[in-house]
Amino acid sequence: MVTSKLEQEILARRTFAIISHPDAGKTTITEKLLFFGGAIRDAGTVKGKKSGKFATSDWMEIEKQRGISVTSSVMQFDYNNCRVNILDTPGHSDFSEDTYRTLMAVDSAVMVIDAAKGIEAQTLKLFKVCRMRGIPIFTFINKLDRQGKEPLELMEELEEVLGIQSYAMNWPIGMGKEFLGIYDRYNNRVEQFRTAEEDRFLPLNAEGGLDVQNDMTKTSYYTQALDDIMLLNEAGNPFSEDAIRKGQLTPVFFGSALTNFGVQTFLETYLNFAPQPQPRLTEDEQYIEPTDEQFSGFVFKIQANMNPAHRDRIAFVRIVSGKFERGMSVTLSRTNKSFKVTQSTTFLADDRETVEEAVAGDIIGLYDTGNYQIGDTIVGGKNKFLFEKLPQFTPELFVRVTAKNVMKQKHFHKGINQLVQEGAIQYYKTLHTEDTILGAVGQLQFEVFENRMKNEYNVDVKMEPIGNKIARWIANEEVVKDAMTGPRSMLVNDRFGNKVFLFENEFAMRWFGDKFPEVELYSLL
Ligand code: GDP
């Protein structure tokens, strides 16, 4: 049995990712959360001026000052007796399979939506991955200090575009220039916008309204909000903690991250409902419980150092059970090799702070010289097992790749082989000509590939973009014939030898479906 102290530590963990489309306000919210958690002093200081990203130097400075682990990949802070781990899911140009895989390492997700834009493409992609895992999803609708879509319309969008039920935890009173505050259904109070801390919260009376003396009650925004809430009470989904836990219902919070409004209320409510570290399945379908005494974890991301002077990489490990202690002996289940994790163990990114101890729910960064692959299981005791495989994701971008120097074929294939195994990129091969095609979900993966081929395998590669494709696997391969391909579709093998159609666009795929209805196509995640 584990000691109750360890159990308490584990149960206090809350590990989540923030998913959003670029510009919805993820960075701004993260800053505020870190600020409330005491991880940073001034919530305005951590943002790079031009890049719109975290300025690493600032983070490093903060780490030094506070002696905590704050990087743009994993951020940790304590709040209300919880230890919170936020995992970053990069957007835009650094979007990659790693982004998806990060969602395999969290127990819940916070979805940030820009009130004026509603659900955007990247949010939808990331949402689908969370949904597949059935993890709880909490929604923060941001930028209420600006004019946006009607709140009811946004709720409808959640249900229609994402297909998830929603429950409004609070409701905006006005919006944009007329934003007065939020009606907090959960805490039975109104939180007033741009009001000093001490006057910010107004309690609701027994009828669920404000004291009529209050000026806000005379505004049409207030009456409108009460009308909407009546509608929600009557016709909306009922609040159900069980449905939240199963990822079937998302609690929705409104607020404005930039003006720091509604974020703390969100954080506190979120921590009440966010799940503790969850068990994970092994390949033999055994559940490994977080409070199991034996340490175990899996690698969900390998971050290569792009600096040629440092070949090293960091393997990010989600601890599934027990406790990690520096110097402990672990076994890599895939190879059955055991080794001591000593000096090589560091906690994340550039400013290498050594982690001495971490428990289930936490993320540790292990210094890697090429031992780890994505999806690897490591265990710290006698019971050896493999965690369930991480899913493969449907790539959207493809390039045809060759070695610039034909004399380098051997290195070329070795490099590709290893990078594919490691999970950096996906490998495909055309059927007869056996051209090498690489697939990715984000452009960055190709850049990392090119760079690592050069630096680690000494091969210059030529990459010829073949553009966006829709990849579909085939449930009944026996019916597929070469003649089914045309100018707008190509047939390739994946690395396991399965056939895959690459369609130029939705139209080409529909056309194919009409012409060859006997072929059963399916997509991965
Ligand atoms: P990210 O790309 O999702 O990380 O978004 P950022 O946090 O960088 O925010 C994108 C832009 O939206 C920045 O200019 C922010 O200042 C702005 N922003 C974020 N939150 C709010 C908000 O609540 N209200 C307004 N008006 N702007 C916001």
Image (spheres, rainbow, N blue to C red):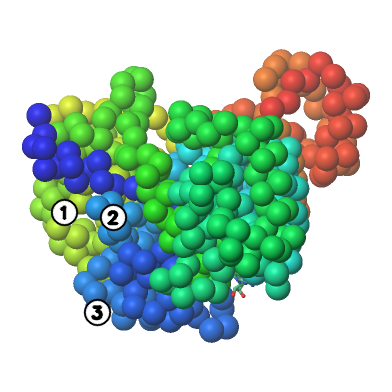
The one of 497 and 10 positioned closer to us in this rendering: 10
Q: CA distance from mark 1 to mark 3?
A: 20 Å
Ligand 1, image quadrant it occupies: bottom right
Residue on which disc 1 sits: 357
Q: Disc 3 marks which amino acid? A: Gln
Horizontal side of residue 81 vs 242, given as left or right: left
Label 1 close to label 2 by CB (< 8 Å): no
Horizontal side of residue 280 vs 399, given as left or right: left
Residue 470 locus on image (x, y percent): 74, 41
Residue on which disc 3 sits: 65
Mark closer to the observer (3, 2):
2
The one of 459 and 105 positioned closer to us in this rendering: 105
Residue 385 locus on image (x, y percent): 26, 28
- Residue at the farthest front position: 213
Q: How many marks?
A: 3
- Mark 1 vs 2, N-terminal side: 2
The one of 172 and 123 positioned closer to us in this rendering: 172
Mark closer to the observer (1, 2):
2
Residue 95 appearing in the image: no
Q: Disc 2 marks which amino acid? A: Asn
- Mark 1 vs 3, N-terminal side: 3
Disc number placed over residue 80 in the picture, else none:
2
Identified at 36% across, 27% down, the residue is 281
* Ligand 1 has an atom within 8 Å of the beta carbon of the residue at disc 3: no
